[in-house]
Image: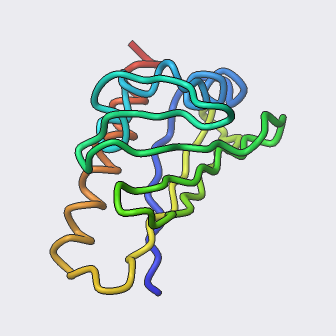
Amino acid sequence: MESRHLSAVIRRDRREVAAVAGDPERLPQWAAGLASGALRREGDALVVDSPMGEVRVRFAPPNDLGVLDHDVTLPGGAVVHNPLRVLAHPLGAEVVFTLRRLPGMSADAFEADARAVAADLERLRALLED
């Protein structure tokens, strides 16, 4: 399985970046690839409208390490684990998302996903720096 690490350096304290990136209510502000519409809670899951349809998202428990991993249950029932980290960086923080090419995914679809994640990270940077 192919993986690609996409990142953005954000000129803010890593704890602040992790707080914003890990706040489910703020996902529509920056994570258009995941949350494009209404959000609602169902138990420990967040149910969101996404470009893929309605998905369920479960985040890693809150922590001080910047681990914002989340599992996304797609409309068909498949679960995709998404590693997401906020790391200390000399300029503030670096947000690193690990994108994995799923079985049966075309190279074009993988590249489109990579562009979408990069755009999401750029929106997060703009949200926090502007």
At x 72%, y 45%, the residue is 60
The residue lying furthest to the right in this view is 64
Viewer-side residue, 1 vs 125:
1
Quadrant assignment, res 121: top left
Residue, far left: 108
User: Does 6 sit above or below residue 10?
Assistant: below
- How many marks are shown on the rendered structure? 0
Q: Please indicate whether residue 12 sits to the left or right of residue 102 in the image.
A: right
Q: Taking 71 as reference, is 118 left or right?
A: left
| Residue at (15% x, 75% y) in the render | 108
Residue at 62%, 36% in the rendered image: 93
Q: Which residue is drawn at 27% across and 71% down?
A: 110
Q: Nearer the viewer, residue 36 or 39?
A: 39
Q: Measured from the top left, where is residue 38 in percent x and y? A: 34, 22
| Depth check, front residue: 63 or 47 | 47
Report which quarter residue 78 is drawn in. Answer: bottom left
Coloring applied to the structure: rainbow
75 and 109: which is toward the camera? 75
Residue 16 locus on image (x, y percent): 66, 21
Please state the horizontal and vertical placement of residue 113, each as a whole percent of the image: 28, 60
Location of residue 49 in the rendering, given as x and y in whole percent from the top left corner: 32, 34
Q: Which quadrant, please, contains the C terminus?
A: top left
Q: In which quarter of the image is residue 86?
A: top right
Left or right: 56 as drawn, with respect to 122: right
Above or below residue 19? Residue 105 is: below
